[in-house]
Amino acid sequence: MNPTLRNPLLFAAVAALIVATGLLNSWNVALNILNMGLISAIMALGVNMQWGYAGLFNVGVMGFVALGGLGAVLVSMPPVAEAWAAGGARVLLALAVAVATIAGAVALWKRLRGRRARGLVLAVFLVIGFFLFRWLFDPAVAAIEAVNPAGTGYLGGLGLPVLIGWPVGGLLAAGAAWIVGKTALGLRSDYLAIATLGIAEIIIAVLKNEDWLSRGVKNVVGIPRPWPVPYEIELQDSAAFVARMQGWGLDPVSASAIVVKLLYALLFAVILLALIWLSQKALNSPWGRMMRAIRDNEVAAEAMGKDVTGRHLQIFILGSAVVGLAGAMLVTLDGQLTPGTYNPLRFTFLVWVMVIVGGSGNNWGAVLGGFLIWFLWVQVEPIGLWIMEQITAGMAEDSAIRQHLIKSAAHMRLLTMGVILLLVLRFSPRGLIPER
């Protein structure tokens, strides 16, 4: 089929699935799928930049998503005055000492000559810096986490609009990508994958254990909503809104939830369209052609005078920034940061399935994969449960086989993802919307 006709039909099919969910199930469920599909599409777009443009195998997507969420928290949550008074200044001083220690160690390594003397001086310098850092840091953290640990127990944020936190989340992810890239991009693709996965786990471990920063596994709740999205209770308290919904024959409570989700969808769609426009412009520019040339043959590109490592670092930072932006949008939609929920299955494997199924190297393919795979991830389990109930309808209620099959419906998600991946790789190995 002609791609000009096939691609719109694929998007129309996914849209029809979401609309059918609204008609047959609930519009709240359908809009939830739509909003998470928009965020998933942005994540897939970021990974597609790294893999589809440059062939970089990043298995640490989870860590960059989490850093994006942390950025939204640090910007939007109100500062905890008691925690700042108890140890905020001392924590900042300790972090400054840590940065100065690392910078000083780098400077010493460059200036000193003689392997043995340099190693000894560097070791003494780092040990002194470490103990000074811990001397400042540990009492300050203990004092901060002792301030109302059930409700706060952390420093809070800057109290700014959460929309500012979205690009800040992208910048945090980009900064981490620069550090990772400077150390790991020279590795072979499989070693790069191992390095990014390990660093992502380190990021999650920090978020889980540093309560003074992110409340750890106690979670940060009550993240403000972006403009122009109101709270449902605000709409329900509006006499004009209630009268209008009742005039249309709608329940104001259900209608308020639908209006909020529609506004979120509009906001997310604007950001996704802007990113697609920029991505398409970049991909079709001389820069994009150069990136694809490096991806296809690094030796030939380097022989033509291209800075392969520098360009890899560039695209790695850009893709991670987009993933971090999606992570900030995700915690804003959820209204909370929950470090314990970040796992490789949801925030790395699933995003990679979106890119592969949609079409690696094609921005529209990554977007299609984001919507399609997220829809299936949400809907396959209840559909699987219904199928199992129909299959076992004639069995006795206490039948061991019946109970086993019904309990197995929870695993339909993983089975379906594997089957879809195999089918796409067999019949359309370049994805549903392949790269031209």
Image (cartoon, rainbow, N blue to C red):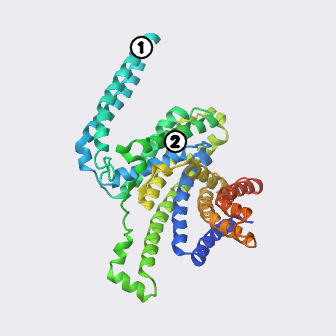
Q: Which amino acid does label 2 sit on?
A: Ala
Q: Which residue is drawn at 42% across and 11% down?
A: 117
Disc 2 from disc 1: Cα separation: 32 Å
Query: Whole-percent x and y of residue 268?
Result: 47, 63
Q: Which amino acid does label 1 sit on?
A: Leu
> Dividing the image into 4 quarters, which one contains the N terminus?
bottom right
User: Quadrant location of residue 194?
Assistant: top right
Q: Check residue 348 in the rendering and tell me which mark sits there, or answer none.
A: none
Query: Whole-percent x and y of residue 66?
Result: 47, 48
Residue position marked by numbered label 1 in the rendering = 120
Query: Whole-percent x and y of residue 296?
Result: 67, 42
The vertical placement of 237 against 69, above or below, is below
Task: Pick the residue in front: 175 or 331.
Answer: 331
Task: Pick the residue in front: 99 or 436.
Answer: 99
Element under disc 1: helix
Residue position marked by numbered label 2 in the rendering = 200
The reply, left or right, for residue 397 in relation to residue 323 is: right
Element under disc 2: helix
Most distant residue in the front direction:
398
> In this rendering, does residue 289 appear at all?
no
Q: Residue at x 34, y 83 (%)?
A: 240
For disc 1, the neighbor class at 10 Å (few under 14, some 14 to 19, many from 20) is few
> In this rendering, does residue 368 appear at all?
yes
Q: Which residue is drawn at 66% across and 35% down?
A: 300
- Nearer the N terminus, badge 2 or badge 1? 1
Query: Whole-percent x and y of residue 259?
Result: 44, 74
The reply, left or right, for residue 354 in relation to residue 204 is: right
The vertical placement of 159 against 117, above or below, is below
For disc 2, the neighbor class at 10 Å (few under 14, some 14 to 19, many from 20) is many
